[in-house]
Amino acid sequence: MLFDSAFDNPDIAPDFDPDDLEGCVPSYTCEGEQVGDAWHVTVRGLPGGAEVHVQGKTWRKAKRHTIDAVQKALGPDSGVYGLQFVPADPEAAEAVDAYYEARQALCFAEQKLRDTAREAARTLTAQGWSNRDTGSVLMMSHQRISQLAPRDARQE
């Protein structure tokens, strides 16, 4: 089925708010810029005014080198921190940010799909609909209906 992959993902906690994560741990922005055939990454604002400058042939290698350099700069007792990698070019950074916002919106939309599918399956089967008829109206397999509205839950 077209939407079945949404059920492969774990549920988001009902009280989760991504905005609550801001400020939980120190976070550093890593700006990457392509110079010639290499990526140059700069991390500013580290403790003590330190900065990290690294290079890598690819974005992936530059990212790995940056992680290693920041770990070294912060030291072994630095605790938990976050690194956000962004393109230095504002237009590219905006495009990447829009992409990640869309991914986050998709996660919440898939959660709404899972929640409403469970509710619909439980409502219909509680009214005596068969799993096959429920699946047919919701455009899901009868096996998926069995997962969403297990018999044990219907008997409570």
Image (tube, helix red, strand yellow):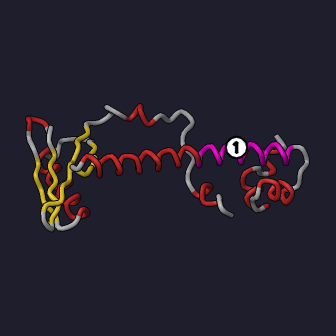
Q: Which residues are magenta?
A: 110-126
Residue 56 relative to residue 103: left or right: left
The quarter of the picture where the C terminus appears is top right
Q: Tell me residue 95's x, y (percent).
A: 35, 50
The crowd level at tag 1 (other Cα within 10 Å; few <14, some 14-19, many 20+) is few
Q: Nearer the viewer, residue 111 or 26?
A: 111
Q: Residue at x 86, y 57 (%)?
A: 133
> Of helix, strand and loop, which mostly describes the magenta segment?
helix
Q: Is residue 115 magenta?
A: yes
Instruction: Spot the residue most to the front.
Output: 91
Given the current orientation, which residue lies at the most extreme right position? 128
Query: Residue 77: where, in percent of width, then height?
Result: 17, 42
Q: Position of residue 94 (x, y in %)?
A: 33, 46
- Write the residue at 84% across / 44% down: 155
Q: Which residue is mark 1?
A: 116
- Left or right, 44 with respect to 85, comes to left
Q: Given the image, on which type of amino acid does mark 1 rest?
A: Thr
- Which quarter of the figure is the N terminus placed in? bottom right
Circle 1: element type:
helix
Tell me if 82 is positioned left or right of 109 in this view. Answer: left
Tell me, yes or no, whether the highlighted magenta stretch contains residue 104: no
Q: Quarter of the image holding residue 58?
A: bottom left
Residue 59, quarter of picture = bottom left
Q: Residue at x 36, y 46 (%)?
A: 97
* Residue 96: x %, y % from top left: 35, 51
